[in-house]
Image (tube, rainbow, N blue to C red):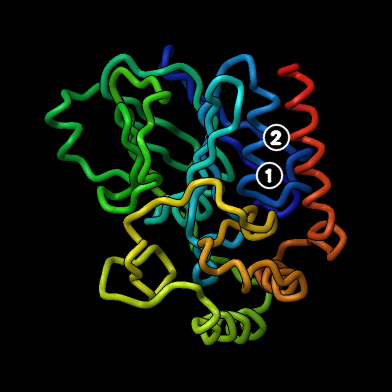
Amino acid sequence: MNLDYKRVLYINFDEQTFEFKIHEDLWKYIGGIAVSYKLALDNFEENPMILTCGPLSGFFPYISKANFLYLDSGKFVEKYGGGNIATNMNLASIDAIVMVGRPKGFIKVTVYDKEVLFSEELEKDFDKTIYDFVAKKSTINSLGYFSFTNRPLDSFNLQGGFGIKVEASRSIDLNDFYDYENLYQGFLNQYKELTVEPRNNPSCAGCPMGCDNSAVGEDDLNIAILPRCLISCGYAEEIYKNIPNVYAALNSVGYRYHHSHLENLPRLVGEIRANFAKRNS
């Protein structure tokens, strides 16, 4: 696991090239939206599209969302969706994917531990393939069911589309299985604190709820920074904004974060937003 750094995959759609980079400076941002913001700021001139997971994706329930961030007229646009993409990224030790350029046609991207394969597809074949994450013209979804938004994306400016399939080979390694098992069961037993009702729909990875909103993406809702860095479902905000519980969860799977790291997140995100505003002024 990436215990004291973030591993970022860079994809260039214009050249169909890739590069994995290690970022020690991103570690303090935990994951999710904070990492997305920082990468967007660092790569601003290239108009990036950024996909991030959280450090607990695949480990605990209600925490399987991924963040998709892009820029529209110099402003951040945040989208959140479920499915398996966040879990598969975490199991493949990929904390973020930074994409530059825009596909002219339809591109299938298959990601392995250290390799990325590109293949150009006919639209009819592209539409038949099941991806962990797919963006096509004004649509962003996952596994063909879990949407990243229920709003028009006219500003997305894709002429074609791209689909990402992450082939994860790593199993979950635990620092302390006893602590982890107790914490997992404790989070699972807090399902009554979720602000959504269980249903019989397909569920996001690691979630038993199958709620009516599992197919509907989340936009930039008024959710606390910590849950958006992990990345939890917006309906589980009360569970994942609890710093002692999150600290224990991170520690149980081997991360070396302290309470101060979690408490400093709002300040760090505020600084990124301020720097971003200066760049656009």
Instruction: Give the CA distance from mark 1 to mark 2.
Output: 6 Å
Nearer-the-camera pick, 202 or 114: 202
What SS does tag 1 mark? Answer: helix
**Residue located at (73% from left, 27% from top):** 276
Give the residue type at disc 2.
Answer: Lys
Q: Name the spot of residue 2 as percent of width and height, x first.
A: 66, 51
Q: Are marks 1 and 2 in contact (CB under 8 Å)?
A: yes
Q: Is residue 69 left or right of residue 13?
A: right
Nearer-the-camera pick, 162 or 47: 47
Give the residue type at disc 1.
Answer: Ala
State the quadrant of the N terminus.
Answer: bottom right
Q: Is residue 196 left or right of residue 202?
A: right
| Residue that label 2 marks | 38
Q: Residue furthest right?
A: 260
**Residue located at (57% from left, 80% from top):** 187
Total numbered circles:
2
Give the number of the disc on residue 122: none
What SS does tag 2 mark? Answer: helix
Above-or-below relation of 146 to 233: above
Above-or-below relation of 95 to 75: below
**Residue located at (68% from left, 44% from top):** 34
Q: Name the spot of residue 105 as percent of width and height, x first.
A: 27, 18
In the rendered image, which quarter is residue 155 located in? Answer: top left
State the quadrant of the C terminus.
Answer: top right
Nearer-the-camera pick, 136 or 177: 136
Is disc 2 surrounded by few (<14), some (14 to 19) or many (20+) residues within 10 Å?
many
In the rendered image, which quarter is residue 158 located in? Answer: top left
Is disc 1 surrounded by few (<14), some (14 to 19) or many (20+) residues within 10 Å?
many
Q: Name the spot of residue 61 as percent of width and height, x first.
A: 50, 72
**Residue located at (37% from left, 56% from top):** 83
| Residue that label 1 marks | 34
